Image (spheres, helix red, strand yellow):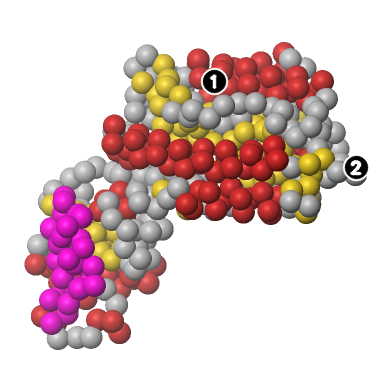
Amino acid sequence: MHSKESLLIYADSEHCADMLYAVGMFVPDPFVFLRLNGENIVILNDLEIDRAKKNITNCTILSSSEYSQKLGKKLNRRGPEEIIKMVLRERKIKKLSVPYQFPFGLAKQLKAAGFKLKPTQGPVFPEREIKNADEVKKISAALMMAEVGLAEGIQALKRSRIARNGKLMLNQLPLTSEKLRSIIDTAILQAGGLPANTIVAGGTQSCDPHERGHGPLKAHQPIILDVFPRSQKTGYFGDITRTVVRGKASERLQKMYHTVQEGQAIAFREMGNGVSGKVPHAKVLEWFEKQGFPTGQKKGRMQGFFHGTGHGLGLEIHEAPRVSPASPNTLLTGHVVTVEPGLYYPDIGGVRLEDVAYVSENGTRNLTKFEKVLLV
């Protein structure tokens, strides 16, 4: 949206990435952010005011209780609309842009009071797409948290024993997806990250890219570990995937793994400033076909490579730009995107490898340091 347009956001900054981007501070309850005539304004309750004065540097901070006193109404019963109306009238503002997900009830109240609200076309803050050096550091810190979790998970797999029935045993108990996920998530928490829906999917479960995984893990089968923690300090995400086998991998699985690894390298080479998001994806798909790994439907389910090569990463786990067959995006210097090709066949299992790329003038830089080893 145009930075000169008046903007109103009403949300909490723990769940709304745009609000967190606007103020840079976690606030658990919904509050008001306004951009009026180039001035950023936040309206907060007394519980948050002192913290805000220390942490929010780019905004005028107003107290909701002071406006409450001016209005002579108990606003905890009336909602925020009276304060918003008063601030807008003070500054003679009648027209505002609001995010597409703006609360319906609040919009209705403001419209009834004569204010004109227009949902934003496209992102609220288009500049969020281009990451500055400080944001790249924050993403790299979140990636380190993911790496700590992955390392613990892989150590547990290495320590596991292969039972006669092929199940993996750890400390005399079956090693399940749930147990391994808890090992990974605990390490992430201790490193300052917030894990959510960590994927530990073994065997045929690894063929469904968003299957979290459940039940006993087995030897000689692929196990996909996809870890995407959010930094508790900054709100930025990291995102890494590795595929491992405890025991032996069939020749076909090994070929599949190396094909995916080379596919990822191709995507990294193809990406750069000014490149369409469709191009790296098409090149990876072409490489997979050449290697004898076709994509399409078989027996009513998709096989091969049927998801995008990557997505933007930042204050949301999935954000613009996209690196996919239908991507409308052009990659630009400052974009941070995942590079995560995969192959999935029910008779073999799934393989996915994911690193994070920083797009620069002359190609890409891999922000992920974690090694890639199939057999553990």
Q: Which residue is mark 1?
A: 267
Residue 343 drawn at (x, y percent): 70, 29
Q: Which element is circle 2 on?
A: loop
Left or right: 352 with respect to 27?
right
Q: Is residue 43 above or below residue 292?
A: below
> Badge 2, how many Cα within 10 Å: few under 14, some, many 20+?
few
Number of the front mark, 1 or 2? 2
Residue 229 drawn at (x, y percent): 49, 47
Q: Quadrant of the C terminus?
A: top right
Query: Is any atom of residue 365 visible in this view?
Result: yes
Q: Is residue 260 magenta?
A: no
Q: Which mark is residue 164?
A: 2
Query: Is any atom of residue 297 visible in this view?
Result: no
In the image, the segment drawn in magenta is: 44-69
Left or right: 315 with respect to 83?
right
Among the 4 quarters of the image, the one containing residue 326:
top right
Q: Earlier in the sequence, mark 1 or mark 2?
A: 2
Calculate the distance from the C-alpha at mark 1 to the C-alpha at mark 2.
Answer: 41 Å
Name the main secondary structure of what is drawn in magenta. Answer: helix
Among the 4 quarters of the image, the one containing residue 200:
top right
Residue type at tag 1: Ala
